[in-house]
Image (spheres, grey):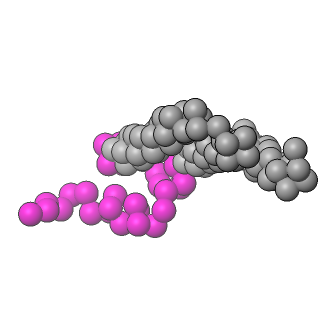
Amino acid sequence: MTPVVALIFGMLGLGAVLAMIRLALGPSLLDRVVATDTILVIVTAGLAVHAAVNRDPTVVPVLVVVALLVFVGAISVARYVGGMLLRTGADVEELGVSPAAEQVQGHEGTERP
């Protein structure tokens, strides 16, 4: 393993540790969701580096599956949290929602064409 590859894996490992700390400490649900997505992206990047360094094309299908899982998981959680906000009228500060979502929640009584 060359020093460059070791440095890359070290940086990915440090990023994973920091994301796990955010996952454990994150005060809101959305902080934990972003940390989980970050960990999965770091795993995907690690697999990609491994495939590139070892010139192993058999890892590519695994990369595609993990990337699709990350994408579908992020979209599913975003839809769930968005629906939860609209249904319950939960306090926006509890969930750590962006100001754009606050505006959507403020206009839930208006009809759209």
Can you name the residue that lies furthest to the front here? 55
Q: Residue at x 40, y 45 (%)?
A: 75
When the figure is inspected, residue 7 is found, relative to residue 54, above or below; the finding is below
Quadrant of the image for the N terminus? top right
Dividing the picture into quadrants, the one containing residue 51 is top right
Magenta range: 86-113
Q: Residue at x 36, y 45 (%)?
A: 79
Q: Residue at x 49, y 40 (%)?
A: 64
Does 98 lie within the magenta span? yes
Can you name the residue that lies furthest to the left here? 113
Residue 78, position as x, y percentages in the image: 42, 47
Residue 83, position as x, y percentages in the image: 33, 44
71 or 31, nearer to the observer: 71
Q: Does residue 51 appear to the left or right of 9 in the view shown?
A: left
93 or 51, nearer to the observer: 51
When the figure is inspected, residue 111 is found, relative to residue 56, above or below; the finding is below
Does 5 lie within the magenta span? no
Can you name the residue that lies furthest to the right here? 3
